[in-house]
Amino acid sequence: MIVPPVTMAIIVAAAIVLSVPRATWRWFGLFTTLVHELGHAFAAALTGRRVTAIHIRADQSGSAHSMGRPGFSAVFSGFFGYPTPALVGLGLVAAVFNGYTSAALVAGGVIIVLTLIFIRNLFGVLVVVVSAAVSFVLWYFGTLEEQSFALLALGVALLVGAVRGLLTVISVHISHRDRLDSSDAYLLYRRSGIPSFVWLAGFSLVIVGSVWAAAVAWLATQS
């Protein structure tokens, strides 16, 4: 799919409207939190841990609980929270540019529905059901072009949201250290003994790298 610069600028503007103003972030941030917690859960499952519960709360906080041995698996699953919205955003952008819009839409919808198995609070169920309903409506009623532009906007919005989340967690370590218990970087320090700034650097590397890769993927369609 070829997206002209003007069209891409409009899509980026729409993504920023979703991810930056407080009024819209109040709602879109809930979906970003869902993706964040799914990142923890998926990473936990990859390392043999048993995912037991996911909670999504109205204040955009969340938690993913898993059972398994302490050590590498706990650290690995703890890392893939903040980077996951960026990785998913990159995946959606790449899927659209490479002609896999329908596959990405169906796969995303299935994953969202399966999340209901692990959701343990009513508000979290509501977030998942609404996300699944939007995915279904887009798949059933949208044309391929509409689906492509919607997924592209969603992918870019997740990238912007990941950057916003990164800046938020960095600000916790700089200006709001009384809230360190809410920081994945601090929790990773507690689990591994590796300083928080190393984990923040790791988050930054993945998120910035994902934004860069998405931009490269778009530029490749222009040649």
Image (tube, grey):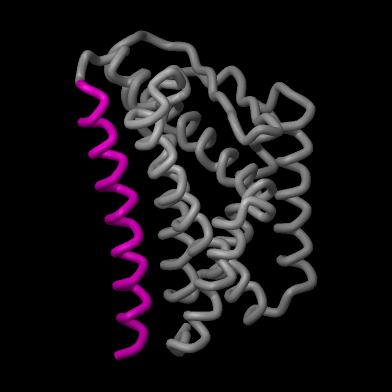
Residue 27 spot, x, y in % from top left: 69, 48
Q: Is residue 143 left or right of residue 208?
A: right
Q: Main secondary structure of the magenta part?
A: helix
Q: Is residue 64 above or below residue 15?
A: above
Residue drawn 48% across and 80% down?
9
Along the line of sight, the residue nearer the viewer: 201 or 23: 23
Please tell me in which quadrant of the rendered image residue 20 appears.
bottom right
Residue drawn 50% across and 55% down?
158
Q: Residue furthest front?
A: 175
Residue 104 spot, x, y in % from top left: 55, 61
Q: Is residue 30 left or right of residue 8?
A: right
Along the line of sight, the residue nearer the viewer: 212 or 168: 168
Along the line of sight, the residue nearer the viewer: 38 or 49: 38
The residues colored magenta run: 195-223
Residue drawn 29% across and 47% down?
206
Please tell me in which quadrant of the rendered image residue 147 appears.
bottom right
Taking the magenta stretch, the answer to whether it contains residue 218 is yes
- Number of labels in the image equals 0
Q: Is residue 155 above or below residue 12?
A: above
Residue 217 spot, x, y in % from top left: 34, 73
Please tell me in which quadrant of the rendered image residue 192 appears.
top left
Q: Is residue 212 above or below residue 158?
A: below
Along the line of sight, the residue nearer the viewer: 143 or 75: 75
Taking the magenta stretch, the answer to whether it contains residue 148 is no
Residue 106 spot, x, y in % from top left: 63, 58
Image quarter hosting the C terminus: bottom left
Residue drawn 62% across and 35% down?
60
